[in-house]
């Protein structure tokens, strides 16, 4: 391969090392690139007070960051300017720049500059964002997303996509040069070493919901109502841990709910990533739901990858390309719809399984092994070679 020793700058709105899902995504891809003897430099964001930070190193990677925008002027500069990026480009002289869900104006400016400065540009696409907020913001964001997804991305030298939906879209309409990478895990990291866990007893079922309430991406109300419709004896056997949301936050968005009559529901609020994984590993099932919309079909739920990689079966509905993983092994339950009746039915199925059957399903999750970044080194090497760096 002609890729050894190549220098790559990875740019985007990620906050290293693990402050958002984007950070986990780019670090795993960076490790694939490093395993191919490429030098990877990250350029992300930070919530510290420095306008520009070039002093941090994360897991052996050199990093640069700019301050997270705090006001309208800073946001305008962040959404349009490439001045800081160009400083780093001038300093590092990269062979390739990977832009993670980058905004359309700076992405296009970098692509145009690449033709004269001699580097290639690849887009890492993990979502098809649906804007919310006031009318003015939705209009601007919709314009930005559509410019990037429909007009700029197809012009880039290559694309890294996160789902079959995005791969099919760019292959069908533009015949783009692509690699399809789901969210990936470094199984060498100690936080992913799966400890043996057992259920509390044959008569207990431990569920976990980990996430936020933002923009109906996940919904707790349906889950709570389903639990409320269990018999009194069934509810006594359900333990539900809510990580990432407080009881006050839920009530503010969804109204009151009689938790005392709905089994053992425990809110833990926002915790660090390592602590969230500890809660996850102690569960029998990770449970989350996604609406059937463009954003969820184009994306790929990181929490699915985290659960399976932690040896925890999943209860969810059809979204993205999850179905193909359920076809590989029995790793949980995949719902056809999000009705209370369907959720209630699957919770009862899980209650009937018993610890031995759940242990078998946990073993299937551990053996699936498709989210280890090391399994994609060959495919990534071929993709980089096709770019003619």
Image (cartoon, helix red, strand yellow):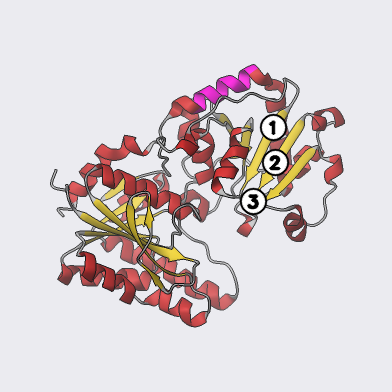
Q: Is residue 362 magenta?
A: yes
Instruction: Check disc 2 and report the residue beneath it.
Output: 241
- 172 or 162: nearer the eye? 162
Instruction: Check disc 3 and report the residue beneath it.
Output: 244
Q: Is residue 331 above or below residue 343?
A: above
Residue at the image point whose x is 64% and y is 53% from the top: 270
Which is more N-terminal, label 3 or label 1? 1
Tell me where residue 113 appears, x and y as whole percent: 22, 72
Q: Is residue 133 above or below residue 342?
A: below
Q: Is residue 307 above or below residue 79?
A: above
Residue at the image point whose x is 40% and y is 60% from the top: 101
Numbered mark located on residue 153 in the image: none
Disc 1 is placed on an element classified as: strand
Circle 1 crowding by C-alpha within 10 Å: few under 14, some 14–19, many from 20: many
Circle 2 crowding by C-alpha within 10 Å: few under 14, some 14–19, many from 20: many
Report which quarter residue 346 is drawn in: top right
> Mark 2 and mark 3 in contact (Cβ < 8 Å)?
no
66 horizontally vs 262: left or right = left
Range drawn in magenta: 356-365
| Residue 315 in view, yes or no | no
Numbered mark located on residue 206 in the image: 1
Which is more N-terminal, label 2 or label 1? 1
Tell me where residue 310 appears, x and y as whole percent: 52, 33
* Quadrant for the C terminus in the image: bottom left
- 170 or 284: nearer the eye? 284
Q: Residue furthest top?
A: 356
Circle 3 crowding by C-alpha within 10 Å: few under 14, some 14–19, many from 20: some
Residue at the image point whose x is 64% and y is 30% from the top: 284
């Amino acid at each position: 391969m002609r890729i050894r020793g190549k220098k790559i700058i990875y740019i985007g709105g990620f906050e290293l090392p693990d402050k958002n899902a984007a950070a986990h995504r780019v670090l795993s891809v960076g490790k694939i690139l490093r395993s191919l003897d490429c030098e990877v430099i990250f350029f992300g964001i930070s919530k510290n007070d420095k306008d520009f930070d070039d002093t941090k190193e994360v897991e052996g990677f050199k990093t640069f960051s700019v301050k997270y925008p705090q006001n309208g002027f800073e946001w305008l500069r962040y959404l349009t300017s490439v001045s800081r990026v160009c400083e780093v480009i001038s300093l590092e002289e990269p062979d390739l720049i990977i832009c993670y869900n980058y905004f359309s104006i700076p992405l296009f400016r970098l692509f145009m500059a690449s033709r004269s400065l001699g580097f290639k540009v690849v887009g890492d696409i993990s979502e098809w964002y649906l804007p919310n907020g006031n009318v003015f913001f939705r209009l601007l964001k919709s314009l930005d997303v559509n410019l990037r997804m429909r007009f700029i991305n197809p012009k880039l030298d290559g694309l890294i996509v996160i789902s079959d939906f995005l791969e099919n879209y760019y292959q069908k309409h533009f015949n783009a040069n692509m690699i399809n990478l789901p969210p990936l895990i470094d199984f060498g990291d100690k936080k992913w070493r799966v400890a043996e866990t057992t259920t509390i007893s044959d008569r207990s079922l431990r569920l976990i919901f980990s996430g936020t309430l933002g923009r109906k991406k996940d919904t707790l109300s349906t889950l709570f109502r389903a639990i409320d419709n269990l018999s009194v004896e069934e509810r006594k056997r359900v333990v539900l841990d809510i990580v990432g949301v407080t009881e006050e936050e839920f009530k503010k968005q969804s109204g009151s709910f009689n938790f005392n009559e709905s089994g053992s529901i425990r809110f833990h609020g926002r915790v660090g990533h390592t602590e969230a994984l500890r809660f996850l590993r102690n569960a029998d099932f990770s449970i989350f739901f996604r609406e059937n919309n463009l954003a969820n079909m184009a994306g790929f739920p990181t929490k699915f990858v985290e659960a399976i990689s932690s040896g925890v079966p999943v209860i969810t509905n059809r979204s993205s390309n999850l179905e193909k993983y359920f076809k590989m092994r029995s790793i949980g339950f995949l719902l056809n719809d999000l009705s209370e009746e369907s959720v209630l039915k699957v919770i009862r199925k899980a209650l009937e399984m018993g610890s031995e059957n759940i242990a078998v399903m946990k073993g299937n999750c551990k053996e699936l092994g498709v989210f280890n970044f090391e399994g994609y080194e060959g495919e990534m090497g071929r993709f980089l070679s096709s770019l003619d760096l």
